[in-house]
Image (cartoon, rainbow, N blue to C red):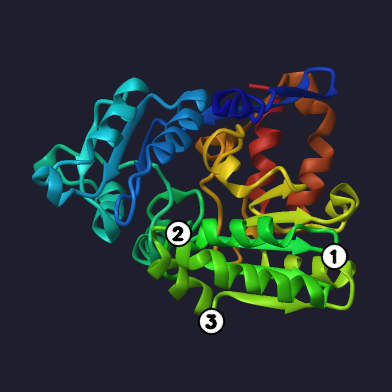
Amino acid sequence: STGAASEAQLPTPRITILGPGAEVIQRWSPVARVGLYVPGGKAVYPSSVVMNVVPAQVAGVSSVAIASPAQRQFDGSIHPTILGAAGLLGIDEIYAMGGAGAIGAFAWGVPGLYLDPVQVITGPGNVYVAAAKRIVRSQVGIDAEAGPTEIMVIADATADPILVATDLISQAEHDELAAAVLVTDSVRLADRVQAELGRLAPLTPHSARVDISLRGIQSAVVLVDNMAAAAEFSNVYGPEHLEIQTADPVEMLDLIESAGAIFLGAHSPVSLGDYLAGSNHVLPTGGQARFTPGLGAYTFLRPQQVIRYSRDALRAVEDKVVALATAENLPAHAAAVTARFVEP
């Protein structure tokens, strides 16, 4: 499913004809080499292997390397589940390294490990990984600073408080720094969700982690006057995951501008997107959804414009190019055109 959704993200090359013999070709060229980060601190994430590798392969990347933290229980090797997922996808360049160091290694290479630098680094991680990706952006491309996870649920009085609470807990399970936010215009729903959080959170196996996340300053229940205000709040926040559990989720969607991934209705939980929805779970955090997308095949593609003019086509626009170059006091620019029509 991730492969099919990634293929849908591939742009179609186009040729724009501006006149006889004058054309601009829009093509999309994959980068040659990428470094994919798969976290491995508090959990094991074979799903992140799939989410990183498949879009890169669909885009046509020829060289793929994976880094994932070394595991003490496996004598310093990568978790075997990660290795198995990588093997099934045909990846044979894998490094047991994690954190900010892994990001730096990908960006500049490590000759002693025969690790060549990459052009793009993708993948989720902790705050140190996210900070490192920010630092290396002048050296390599990145998908986004995909740090500690976030879930925002926009819900009205029709929402099921148990489902809302369950979904908030599901993301709080990732990390003590995970953000779980409910935005609602219903005081009754807010009270019921908080009651369900108090009942359900202690029952989950990672309850200690969940409790810290839900009590952290990054998590909250936000009361708004109406659903328009809820959408406005969400757009300013720019959540990684946005669930809309309202009477008419599609109508609410029309008000949403900024979100990494949007889950509509009571039967589209974030957990579905984490694994099998077909969407990608490597998404921007920290408000970056306001200006950057989640990981996709397009992350590994560079749009390139190819310009091709015939002699007659250039001649037809010679005067205009010369006029613009003269207006900018760049006579050599004009000469680069007129020289082509000087008789020997």
Residue receiving disc 3: 217
Left or right position of 110 against 237: left
Viewer can see residue 236: no
Q: Position of residue 157 (x, y in %)?
A: 85, 65
Disc 1: which residue? 157
Q: Is residue 116 depicted above or below 306 in this figure?
A: below
Residue 212, how many percent across, how many down?
A: 44, 75
Image quarter hosting the C terminus: top right
Quick check: 192 left or right of 52? right
Residue with the mark numbered 2: 204
Residue at disc 2, secondary structure:
loop
- Image depth: mark 3 or mark 2 in front: 2
Question: Which residue occupies 29% across, 55% down?
Answer: 41
Q: CA distance from mark 2 to mark 1?
A: 26 Å
Residue at image location 37% in from the left, 43% down from the top: 45
Label 1 CA crowd tier, 10 Å (few <14, some 14–19, many 20+): some
Q: Which of the marked residues, 2 or 1, is nearer the chain's N terminus?
A: 1
